Image (tube, rainbow, N blue to C red):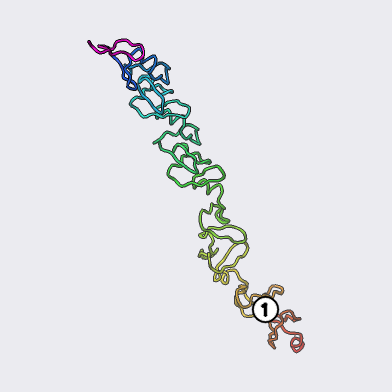
Amino acid sequence: MTERFDCFYCRDNLHGKKYVQKDEKHVCTKCFEKVCANTCAECRRPIGADAKELHHKNRYWHEDCFRCVKCYKPLASEPFNARDDGKIMCGKCGSREDGNRCQGCYKVVMPGSQNVEYKKKVWHEECFKCFECKLAIRAQSFLTKGDDIYCAPCHDKKFSKKCFHCKQPITSGGLSYQDNPWHSECFVCRTCRKSLAGARFTAHENDIFCVDCYKTDVAKKCHGCKNPITGFGHGTNVVNYESFSWHEYCFNCKKCCLSLANKRFVLNGENIYCPDCAKKL
């Protein structure tokens, strides 16, 4: 007599029939679908003994039901993205849904695409543009002002100090004279064009001169010693009277050489005298 081989649930004889072994129990295919089969997370139907089952994190799908929720691409043998809300997406749709959005066009920046990241923000490479000229910055240097981004030439043109002489932006270096900015290469002697950055100079009627050119071309000549009155070093004080000028140390009586600075004097012809010597003339 043959030993009985029955379904655990319906007790049908399983000899010569297809069955499933579930938890050490022999189950016919009908009972398997009714009692034991996992429910597909997509179509909500049982995943039968003849169907290929896929599972991920305690959830189950028919092979044909495991598709991207956006584009319906089959994902049985493809990379996929499982979202916190339970949705399954292909890599492309998942990136579009969850990926970083470009600060220029607000579209998703796809993984692997050319992009620019700055201060935890991201742009498509072609969207990372200068606020002023609207050209893509790409691999060029750039500067910011508030939330706006500028290429270096536009930033210099818009925000850099302008040279007092040539009116062009000062992008590096430079110097200041009388609260006005200058390019170092523009701060030169009016006559000989020698650079005056770091050198002694003097100004005359809005022009600047090196010491030598100022002495030669601009400075008044002392009526006493005939040398230029430059205002540099010894003899910086000047005495002016009518059309004549003197170094203070040259403003002496022609006869007795007494210094007449801040004293009474007499001009006789082109010479000056103290009152006592003037009486003896």
Helix, strand or loop status at disc 1 = helix
Nearer to me, 275 or 106 = 106
Q: In the rendered picture of this protein, how many numbered marks are placed on residues? A: 1
Magenta stretch, main secondary structure class: loop
* Residue 6 included in the magenta stretch of the image: yes
Asked if residue 186 lies in the magenta stretch, the reply is no
Q: In the picture shown, does residue 99 fall above or below 254?
A: above
Identify the magenta region: 1-16
Residue 191 is left or right of residue 95, and the answer is: right
- Quadrant where the N terminus sits is top left
Task: Give the quarter of the figure containing the C terminus.
Answer: bottom right
- Can you identify the residue that label 1 sits on? 248
Residue 220 in picture, x, y percent from top left: 63, 72
Q: Which amino acid lies under the numbered mark 1 shown in the image of this protein?
A: Glu
Mark 1: few/some/many CA within 10 Å (<14, 14-19, 20+): many
239 relative position to 143: left or right? right
How far across and down, in percent of the image, does residue 59 sit? 41, 25
Quarter holding residue 165: bottom right
